[in-house]
Amino acid sequence: LRAVGWMVRAIYRPCDTLLVQSRAFVEPVAQYADRAKIHYYPNSIDVSSSKALVPVPGELLELLEQHFCVVFAGNLGTAQALDTLVQAAVHLRDEPRIRLVLVGSGSRLAWLKAQQQALGLDNLVLPGRFPMEAMPQIFERASALLVSLNDEPAFAQTIPSKIQAYLAAGRPILACMNGEGARVVCEARAGLASPAEHVDALVRNIRQFQSMSLLQREQMGRAGRDYFDR
């Protein structure tokens, strides 16, 4: 690692500018380069191009419109704290209108399906994976968009790419994570944040979202989009 550190310093030394996608990276990078070179430059997504809409199953669209749906979109893998989301679904079984909709695929999809069946979680919906072009139709019908990560130091430093997509969609966000991702959501006033892997705190935030008026949630969504544009 010491040799790698020397190599990194050698690469950074002739650079005029170093861009970091998270403010949490400033201090670590400053160990290898002049701090004056380091600038916060968040990742973004392209929202300018118009793409043809991809059909989305009617039963999914109907579900999104008729229930209070908290939508998670993306990889269903080991980093996404899926155990926390399953336990949240268990806690929310007494809420007839709330649905947790996990859109995507990944290494833990089979495990999620097994948990859904074993625990009788009718409020946990696993519609599968859809093309990126289909996501605007899903996002615009979601009551809230959910992002979650494990309680690990490395994840607290990064900003998941789905946060940019959620902000751009102009929908309120529920962040169940630590560090920079949660900070961005709160700084944007785009939603509510709870600590990573804290089931009770996540459930409280979901219930708080449901108790809000539609206007309050729409204001959060607009604040997130404004933050994304800035």
Image (cartoon, helix red, strand yellow):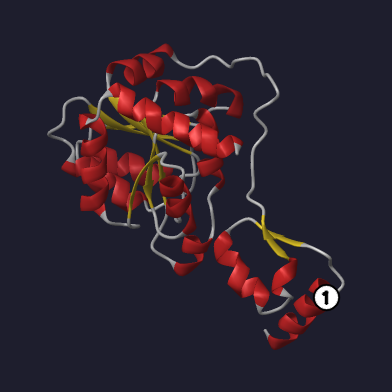
- Residue at point 77%, 84% (across, down): 6
Q: Quadrant of residue 54?
A: top right
Closer to the camera in the image, 146 or 75: 146
x and y, in percent, of residue 112 in the image: 35, 43
* Residue holding disc 1: 13
- Asked whether the viewer can see residue 198, the reply is yes
Closer to the camera in the image, 169 or 112: 169
Q: From this view, report whether residue 220 is shown above or below residue 111.
A: above
Closer to the camera in the image, 114 or 149: 149
**Quick one: SS at disc 1?**
loop
Q: Is residue 2 left or right of residue 171?
A: right
Q: Is residue 108 left or right of residue 10?
A: left
x and y, in percent, of residue 36 in the image: 72, 69
x and y, in percent, of residue 59 in the image: 37, 15
Q: How many marks?
A: 1
Quadrant location of the N terminus in the rendered image: bottom right
Q: Is residue 185 left or right of residue 97?
A: right
Q: From this view, report whether residue 199 is shown above or below residue 114.
A: below
Amino acid type, residue under disc 1 in the picture:
Arg
